[in-house]
Image (cartoon, rainbow, N blue to C red):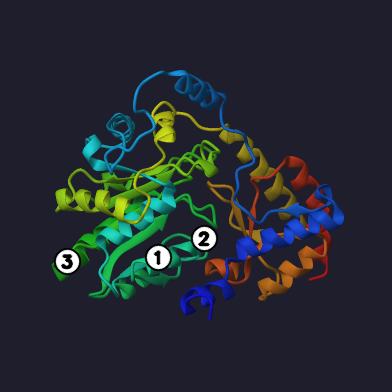
C-alpha cells in the first residue's frame, strides 16, 4: 500500500464537507455557477473590513530590519501584549503576553494544546453535534474523543457529561458559538459545567481542563454575548482564530490563551511554546501577527450575516421546516423531515442545493446549511427547498 493504513482509512472516510464542496464544483461546471446553490463550506463570503487593507499597506511600507524573521516560539511579544490587553477588556483575570501563544489558526492552536496536555489514550469529552476535525486533531496526539449528546435545543446535557467522565478524562471541549448548530452556551450553563469539572477534578486529584474553541465569538445575533469561561474556571484554555470575524481564513492566524491562574501554568506555557515548534509550525506567520495586533477590536459587519440568517430561516419556516434558530456563527442545523439525512440531502441536490448531512457532525437527521453565501444564493435556493419538503 502506497500510504499508511491509517491514512488510507482517513481518505476513505474523508470529510463530508469537502466531499460536497467538490461535488459542487462539478455541478457548477455542468449547470453554471449561478444555478448551483452551495451551502456546504463555512468559507466567509464577506471581504475583510477596510481597515485590514489599510493596516497591511502601512506594515508593508515600514522599513524596519528583521520584521520577517523567526521570533520566540510563542510569537511576537508586541502582538501577545496586544492580545493580552484585548482579553483584559472582557475578563476579570489579568492577562500578560506570557499567557498567550500565537498559532497557525485555531486548528493549529488545538493541536498545540492537545500535544501539550495529552498522554496516550487520554480522552477529551466533546458535546455533539460537533466539528469532526476534532477527532483527527486528537488522533494526531494519541488522544481519544469521548462524544456526549446534547439536549434537543443543543444545550449541554450534564447527565451525559457526568457519565462520560472517567480516570482517562483530560479535558472537556466546547465550541461556542457552535459549528454546526449556531448555538451559544449561556453563562448559567458554563457555570454549571465549571462546577462539575471542579467537583470531578477534586474527587480524582487530577485536573480536568476546559477548552473553548471560539473562532465565531464575535459572530452573534440579537444582542447575545458569549460568556467568558475564564471568569468561571481557572483550568481553562481558549483557542481562536481571525478566520471568521475578519474573513481571513486563508491567512491562518490565531492564538491560544491560558488562564493566568491555571495550576502548573509555567510548565504548561513552556509546553505550548515547545509544541508550537515541534509540530512544525515553528511560528505563526510573522506578517499576520503584526497585522492582527492592530485589528483585535475589528470585525466584518455582523449585521450582514444576521440578515442572511433571517432571510433563510424565515423562508424555511414558512415551508414547514423544523430547526433551532442559530444564535451565532453562520450555520443552520436543519432537522430533516425524514430520518435519513443522506436521502434528504440527495433530494436537495436534485435541485442543485448543496448541504452537508448532519451525520457527518454526529447529528443524524439534520443537515448543516452554511449561509455565509450571497443573498441571491439564498433567495434563488428557497423555491427548491420548498419543492423538496412538499415531497415529504
Residue 270 visible, this orientation: yes
Left or right for 32, reference 343: right
Q: Earlier in the sequence, mark 1 or mark 2?
A: 1
Q: Image point 66% across, 75% down: which residue?
A: 339
Q: Is residue 141 above or below residue 174?
A: below
Q: Which residue is mark 1?
A: 126
| Number of other residues with Cα within 10 Å of mark 1, as a class: few under 14, some 14 to 19, many 20 or more | many
Quadrant position of residue 63: top left
Provide residue 257's location: percent of width, then percent of height. Answer: 30, 44
Count of numbered circles in the view = 3
Res. 206 mark: 3
Quadrant position of residue 24: bottom right
| Number of other residues with Cα within 10 Å of mark 3, as a class: few under 14, some 14 to 19, many 20 or more | few
Provide residue 49's location: percent of width, then percent of height. Answer: 56, 28
CA distance for labels 1 and 2 = 16 Å
Provide residue 134's location: percent of width, then percent of height. Answer: 44, 63
Q: Secondary structure at mark 1?
A: strand
Q: Is residue 71 above or below residue 338?
A: above
Query: Nearer the observer, disc 2 or disc 3?
Result: 3
| Number of other residues with Cα within 10 Å of mark 2, as a class: few under 14, some 14 to 19, many 20 or more | few
Q: Secondary structure at mark 2?
A: loop
Q: Which residue is mark 2?
A: 153
Provide residue 279's location: percent of width, then percent of height. Answer: 34, 56
Left or right for 4, reference 76: right
Query: Nearer the observer, disc 1 or disc 2?
Result: 1
Query: 117 or 261, which is in the foreground?
Result: 117
Q: Secondary structure at mark 3?
A: loop
Query: 378 or 290, which is in the foreground?
Result: 290
Quadrant containing the C terminus in the rendered view: bottom right
CA distance for labels 1 and 3 = 19 Å
Q: Are marks 1 and 2 in contact (CB under 8 Å)?
A: no
Residue 95 visible, this orientation: no
Amino acid at each position: 500500500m502506497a500510504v499508511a493504513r491509517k491514512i488510507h482509512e482517513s481518505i476513505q472516510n474523508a470529510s463530508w464537507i469537502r466531499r460536497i464542496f467538490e461535488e459542487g464544483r462539478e455541478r457548477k461546471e455542468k449547470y453554471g455557477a449561478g444555478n448551483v446553490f452551495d451551502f456546504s463550506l463555512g468559507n466567509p463570503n464577506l471581504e475583510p473590513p477596510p481597515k485590514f487593507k489599510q493596516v497591511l499597506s502601512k506594515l508593508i511600507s515600514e522599513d524596519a530590519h528583521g520584521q520577517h524573521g523567526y521570533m520566540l516560539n510563542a510569537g511576537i511579544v508586541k502582538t501577545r501584549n496586544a492580545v493580552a490587553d484585548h482579553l483584559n477588556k472582557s475578563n476579570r483575570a489579568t492577562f500578560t503576553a506570557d499567557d498567550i501563544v500565537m498559532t497557525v489558526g485555531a486548528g493549529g492552536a488545538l493541536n498545540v494544546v492537545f500535544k501539550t496536555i495529552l498522554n496516550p489514550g487520554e480522552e477529551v469529552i466533546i458535546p455533539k453535534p460537533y466539528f469532526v476535525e476534532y477527532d483527527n486533531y486528537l488522533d494526531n496526539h494519541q488522544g481519544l474523543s469521548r462524544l456526549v449528546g446534547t439536549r434537543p435545543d443543543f444545550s449541554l446535557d450534564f447527565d451525559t457529561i457526568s457519565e462520560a467522565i472517567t480516570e482517562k478524562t483530560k479535558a472537556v471541549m466546547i465550541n461556542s458559538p457552535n459549528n454546526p448548530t449556531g448555538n451559544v452556551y449561556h453563562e448559567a450553563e458554563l457555570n454549571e459545567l465549571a462546577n462539575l469539572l471542579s467537583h470531578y477534578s477534586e474527587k480524582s486529584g487530577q485536573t480536568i481542563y476546559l477548552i473553548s474553541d471560539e473562532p465565531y465569538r464575535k459572530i452573534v445575533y440579537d444582542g447575545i454575548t458569549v460568556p467568558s469561561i475564564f471568569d468561571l474556571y481557572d483550568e481553562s484554555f481558549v483557542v481562536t482564530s481571525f478566520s471568521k470575524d475578519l474573513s481571513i481564513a486563508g491567512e491562518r492566524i490565531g492564538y491560544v490563551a491560558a488562564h493566568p491562574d491555571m495550576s502548573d501554568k509555567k510548565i504548561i506555557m513552556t509546553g505550548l511554546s515547545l509544541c508550537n515548534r515541534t509540530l512544525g509550525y515553528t511560528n505563526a506567520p510573522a506578517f499576520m501577527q503584526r497585522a492582527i495586533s492592530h485589528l483585535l477590536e475589528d470585525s466584518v459587519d455582523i449585521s450582514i450575516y444576521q440578515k442572511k440568517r433571517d432571510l433563510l430561516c424565515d423562508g424555511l419556516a414558512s415551508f414547514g421546516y423544523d430547526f433551532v434558530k442559530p444564535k451565532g456563527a453562520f450555520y443552520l442545523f436543519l432537522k430533516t423531515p425524514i430520518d435519513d439525512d443522506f436521502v434528504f440531502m440527495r433530494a436537495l441536490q436534485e435541485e442543485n442545493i448543496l448541504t452537508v448531512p448532519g451525520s457527518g457532525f454526529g447529528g443524524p437527521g439534520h443537515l448543516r446549511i452554511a449561509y455565509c453565501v450571497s443573498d441571491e444564493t439564498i433567495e434563488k435556493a428557497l423555491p427548491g427547498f420548498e419543492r423538496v419538503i412538499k415531497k415529504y
